[in-house]
Amino acid sequence: MDWGSSNHGTALMLTRSTLLCFVVVAATAVTPAFARAADPFVDLAEKSNRKLVKLFGAGGFARLNNYGTGIIISKDGYVLTVASQLLDTSDLVVHLYDGTRLKTKVIATEPELDIALLKIQSEDKLDLDYFDFFEAAKRPPSEPGDWVVAMSNTFEIALRDEPLSVQRGVVSAYTKMAGRRGIFEFPYTGEVYIVDAITNNPGAAGGALLTRKGELIGIIGREIKNSLSETWMNYAIPIQAKTEVKIKEIVKDKNGKDVEQEKTVVVSMPEFVTLGMQGKYKPITKPKVIGGEGGYHGIIFVPDILERTPAYIEDVVPGSPADKAGLRADDLVSFVDGEPIVSIKAFHEYIKKNTRAGIVLRLEVRRGESLETVELTLGAQPSKPKLPTPSKP
Amino acid sequence: MIQLRLSMPVAAVASPALVALVALIVPQTIAAPSEVDKTVLAAQQERIAAIKKVHPAIVAVCVQGGQGVGSGVLIDAEGYALTNFHVVQATGPLMQAGLANGVLYDAVVCGIDKVGDVALIKLQPKEKGTPFPFVEMGDSDKVKAGDWSLAMGNPFSLAMDFTPTVTYGIISGVNRYQPPEGKGLLEYTDCIQIETSINPGNSGGPLFNMKGELIGINGRGSFEKRGRVNSGVGYAISINQIKNFLGHLRAGIDADHATLGASVGTASEDAPLTQMVIKQMLDESDAYRRGLKEGDQLIEFAGRPVTSTNQYKNILGIYPKEWRLPLTIRRDNTRHEYLVRLMGNQAAVIEKANQPMGPPQPAPPAPPKGPLPKGGVETTKMYEGRKGYSNWYFNVLERDKLLEAFKKSGDFSGVAGKWTIDGKFAMADRNGPLHAEINPTKDGTIIKLKMNIETTLDPLQQTDIHIQQEPIGSGGLMMAMYHYHRFLTLGTKGFEGLFAHGGYEPFYPPPADGSVPKSLASLRVDCAVIDTKHGSANCKWFFSRKDNTLLGFELYVAKDARETEDRDPCEVYCYDYKDVSGRKLPHRFEVRYRDKRYATLTVSSYNLEK
């Protein structure tokens, strides 16, 4: 075929669209030239793979994955991962690099850092390869332009003894997080690494972000959209991460009266890990989580993992208003004062907006095959849990 | 998780264009060359050299008229190119292909592998005999996670003059298993996972190592919330899998993958370590006839350890059906090694293949309806449909090429008369003189075989399976002699049922000295196969790919016999080729049936009549 025909082909191409908009994120000037670009990442991938686990837990429906990744940070099996719905199960399991399948327990979680500490359960004494978390936490953070390697069980490609996926890229930015998940602002607002590789896919959360020497620098986060640009974020939480949380505290004033006072607490990942390993960590609780406005009921719902999780009661706090009203596990809260309750969130919102201590609510709950009406007299919010005493790692 | 193919939807590309322009900020300062580490410069030079080397051989696969659908890569000077099955599914059997020189060539589909998502196409040179540029195939078993790689092709049909796009990234994983998309097709086994960016239009394009050797064919990605563009997780079919199918692809076969005929699973899902065991077996499977049992622990398959369900599928998934492969099991603490013939798995799937596949996504368009679109003048002549073949034209081509090469050992068409063979035989319990006659008469061929006891067979009159399998215990040695005579003297004319190239297969001739082999795997010789059918008997003929010698043949008296124990072939292995009046014939045969040696025949004289 001659050039004429080729040009014909060309013309055809010009008239058609690709329906796809390409958005190439403007890359900052990067000169990784001294990073020995010639070296492949084979050794790093092999060694790091031994220090990571495939994590399996709750989920498997409604676009919530029941798989993720974890980072081993001690030879006896402490594991760091993201504080996701995956952990809302008593049946948490890891697969080690050699295919060993072991049960795992959640030791502590901190939603403000979106982080969780797990412990692998084993009858035999474990002697695992691990990332030295505290050593890593002492190093200064990586900078924009630094090479990074990401390792995770993205898309659940690996099972048992299959190695995790490895990707490489550079740090595009080290900046404050501004993310959202669905319609909700993301709780963590501290510093994050933004990476130019597509690291944050299903199952990648809890994976490791490494320097090209294989040093741990961050924990790959979830699938979250940037709340400013509406684009998917590829981020990792640095292991030095800390965040400031404003909480409300009730203190006695001069007259011995209870008054509410705002206070800023700093929570850091090293502190979380240190206390967590000692079994002493207590999560920071923002006012809105438990002690929001509205009356106290004492209902414990099933884990709220769906956009609209039906308001099933998992348990009631003994002695609480809910207990006294005769509510019990497996009841489904369907109406409150005639208002349909479509989800756990809707219930909380109703309580927050419309109630205070002393109010009597008429709940209609589905119990087995029947619909029961229950009168619930709300109480006052119980006093706040004590904050952890910060201690140096 | 949704797995998607990466071909360009032709329908989608017809609507108005909207391509957002992109600002690429250029670094303000560029480090002076003197500051750059030498290894970095060396790596850069290597990269440039690799791209330059392979660049001319990258193919943009187009529908007639030049609209891009996918990518491909030339693998020899004649113009054979690899691409994805799902790409040729969109073009139909006649297509066009653009090269980096800007020229659009006519092309025709050769072989296809629907399950493996591979197709071989043939480009026609503008002038007969002009060689095409092509790339070298590498060894994908040597690829490791963390290695650098290059993907090339025509994503989004960006290049209007077919100049290939290059992307660069690392291998994210090897020996990956990605389940079939839709109804059993497009199963990616033992594949290579890459972060190297691949997008719609990259389908069928090559993945290279940094030496510029072809290590895979890009075809799929994992896509979910981010849409159908590079998600950082792409998959390439390993070139070593494609090598196993290359004989089938060149021979225009609609190739099929295999099953063991047994379901294999983990002994217990909750156990700390996996043990793979045989759970259920099909009576008609070779695995069952070879003596495998439910509960056997699978240790090794085709020379690789079996550690998980995915790994088992990876091993099985890279072989065509009917391949014979070694398999090691543990039963009562004893290891047993078997050679097992694999069963086809497409039969169940093929019915569904005509239905739309996969999730409701912008899938490649269905093959054009109605009459075939007009192809090039040459390529139209090069397409011939036939059941079981994607293009029978290429089967005849490859078959005749093989027969022509085999003819160098002698032309037997002039000696199609009575053959008399004398020598000695040795069996487990007796031995003595051998006398055999193959006598074609007007009323049919009569075979006589005397090894102490005389047996005769009139193959067309005596149609009972058990008579055809005589002498007892041989699986049909007289029938095999009858077919051997026909194959040598009549060739294609002697087999009214089938005479086709059967692709490549491994063959396991026992040691010529009769000794016990170290392992069954060590016997393997790679062969090209001819499949024949005459009457009710099928035969497979194995030619060494090194020198085209006929190493042996397997005769199935009744491949689909009702009693499954009758389905095993009489295996004849040929050794010690010597000259017989200007023609080469084996002077020693080993005859085996059902994993046992039946007899060794040593020939002292052949008498070949006209």
Image: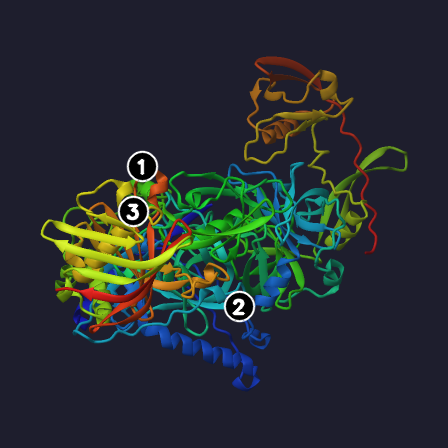
Quadrant in which the C terminus of chain A appears: bottom right
> Which amino acid does the dot numbered 2 rest on?
Thr
The crowd level at tag 2 (other Cα within 10 Å; few <14, some 14-19, many 20+) is: some
Measure the alpha-carbon separation of dots 3 and 2.
80 Å
Tell me if B497 is positioned left or right of B473 in this view: left
Residue B378 seen by the camera: yes
| Position in image of residue A345 (x %, y %) | 60, 31
Q: Residue tagged by mark 1?
A: B562
Q: Residue tagged by mark 2?
A: A28
| Position in image of residue A291 (x %, y %) | 73, 33
Determine which quarter of the picture holds residue B381: bottom left
Q: How many marks?
A: 3
- Given residues B135 and A269, the one toward you in this image is B135
Determine which quarter of the picture holds residue B98: bottom left
Chain ID at mark 1: B
Q: Compared with residue A208, is residue B147 higher up or lower down, i.e. above or below?
A: below
Please give the label number shown on residue A361. none
> Which amino acid does the dot numbered 3 rest on?
Glu
Ranked by sequence position, the earlier of labels 3 and 1 is 3
> Which amino acid does the dot numbered 1 rest on?
Arg
Q: Residue furthest bottom?
A: B34
| Position in image of residue A92 (x %, y %) | 65, 41
Tell me if A157 is positioned left or right of A191 in this view: left
Tell me if A179 is positioned left or right of B22 in this view: right
Kind of element beneath mark 1: loop
Q: Nearer the viewer, mark 3 or mark 1?
A: 3
Q: Nearer the viewer, mark 3 or mark 2?
A: 3
Q: Are marks 2 and 1 on the same chain?
A: no
Determine which quarter of the picture holds residue B13: bottom left
Q: Residue furthest right?
A: A255
Q: Residue tagged by mark 3?
A: B470
